Image (cartoon, rainbow, N blue to C red):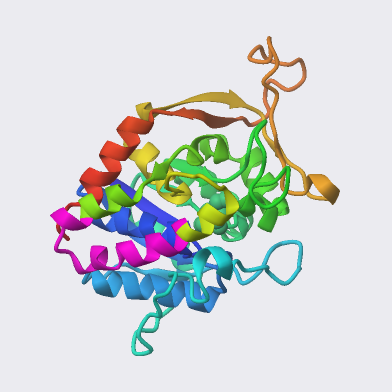
Amino acid sequence: MKNVLLFCDPGIDDSIAIMYALLHPDINLVGVVSGYGNVDKKQATNNVAYLMDLANQKGIPIIGGATRSCTGEAPIYYPEIHGEDGLGPIRPPDTIKGELLNFSEVFKVIERHSDVFVVDVGRNTSLAVAMILDNEFQKKVKGFYVMGGAFLVPGNVTEAAEANFYGDPIASNFVMSEIDNVYSVPLNVTNKAIVKHEHILAIQDQSSSALISILDEVYDYYYEAYKKLVPGIQGAPLHDVVSLSLLMNPGMGQFLTRRVSVQSIGAARGQSLANFRVGSEAPIEGEEDLTKANIYLSLDYDAFIKDFIKIMSKQS
Ligand code: RIB
Ligand code: CA
């Protein structure tokens, strides 16, 4: 059993990651930190509360995360990909409102449970704030999985940048260059995590869970958006769930360990850089003690799909 504290901004693929976490028999979801990103913080929180309600999960703390980036700018939302309210065509009932716990609950959750893994599938602002508030935070967490970045491949919001790192490049640079037990889950692997309509139908065929009853509607909205972005695409890349799937199946992909930096200005804003040149695995003089990230660069697609269908088909 792995204890997971999830930082997210649901968002369609975040919501599907939450479903996966709630349904996984070996994940103990110890808390969810909801912040701005795909939608604003309030909507993200209501979406988390709605998913918890569908899953009949009443005891999992929902913790209030950040409302905007360390750059100080007003956030940009993406209704064309995630829908006006973050769940495609679905609007959570007005009667369900997320009751937010104060951010200090993050530290209480870490104290309360041993060996907690932090999985961050949104903008990295809230995670950076946790690290700033508590200098020892990194040491108290067993491991970090961060969905973000694009190494030597095109970005998805600009030619250089992936959306999470673009949204708050200052926080992402801090997180990626300061945490020494971080697993980076960039577009290099998540773009390959294409879930097809037939996979969703197979899951819904096997499941009677209320949580899964909305899966086709949210997926279809997201897939339609991706068809416009990538003509001919055969399904939709479910970026966020890959981090959880790799946490539970670390051998499902391969990673290289490198120093990472995230650029924050100009055309390179949000771009993630690491040195993959021949010989770059050897320690660089003067940089031996610098923190390095484990960057996933390949994914066993068949194993991912098999795991995704298996977990999503479980009864809640
Ligand atoms: O680039 C993919 C990421 O951006 C995912 O976390 C998705 O939810 C979007 O915000
Ligand atoms: Ca996300």
Task: Give the image quarter of residue 211.
Answer: bottom left
Which residue is nearer to you in this view: 199 or 72?
Answer: 199
Image position, residue 147 (x, y; %)? 52, 46
Which residue is nearer to you in this view: 204 or 12?
Answer: 204
Which residue is nearer to you in this view: 5 or 83?
Answer: 83
Residue 297 located within the stretch drawn in magenta: no
Question: Is residue 305 shown to the viewer in this render?
Answer: yes
Query: Image check: 22 left or right of 289?
Result: left
Query: Image check: 122 left or right of 253?
Result: right
Task: Give the image quarter of residue 221.
Answer: bottom left
Query: Image check: 71 left or right of 120?
Result: right
Image position, residue 97 (x, y; %)? 39, 84
- Image quarter where the N terminus lies is top left
* Residue at the front extreme of this rendering: 232
* Residue at the right extreme of this rendering: 266
For residue 125, above or below residue 83: above
* Residue at screen point 76% across, 15% down: 285
* Magenta stretch, residue numbers: 204-223
* Residue at screen point 67% across, 25% down: 289
Magenta stretch: helix, strand or loop mostly: helix
Image position, residue 201 (x, y; %)? 24, 54
Task: Give the image quarter of residue 294.
Answer: top right
Image position, residue 123 (x, y; %)? 59, 57
Question: Is residue 250 shown to the viewer in this render?
Answer: no
- Image quarter where the C terminus lies is bottom left
For residue 39, above or below residue 204: below
* Residue at screen point 14% across, 57% down: 315
Which residue is nearer to you in this view: 297 or 145?
Answer: 297
Query: Image check: 134 left or right of 261?
Result: left
Residue 214 located within the stretch drawn in magenta: yes
* Residue at the bottom extreme of this rendering: 95
* Residue at screen point 48% across, 70% down: 86
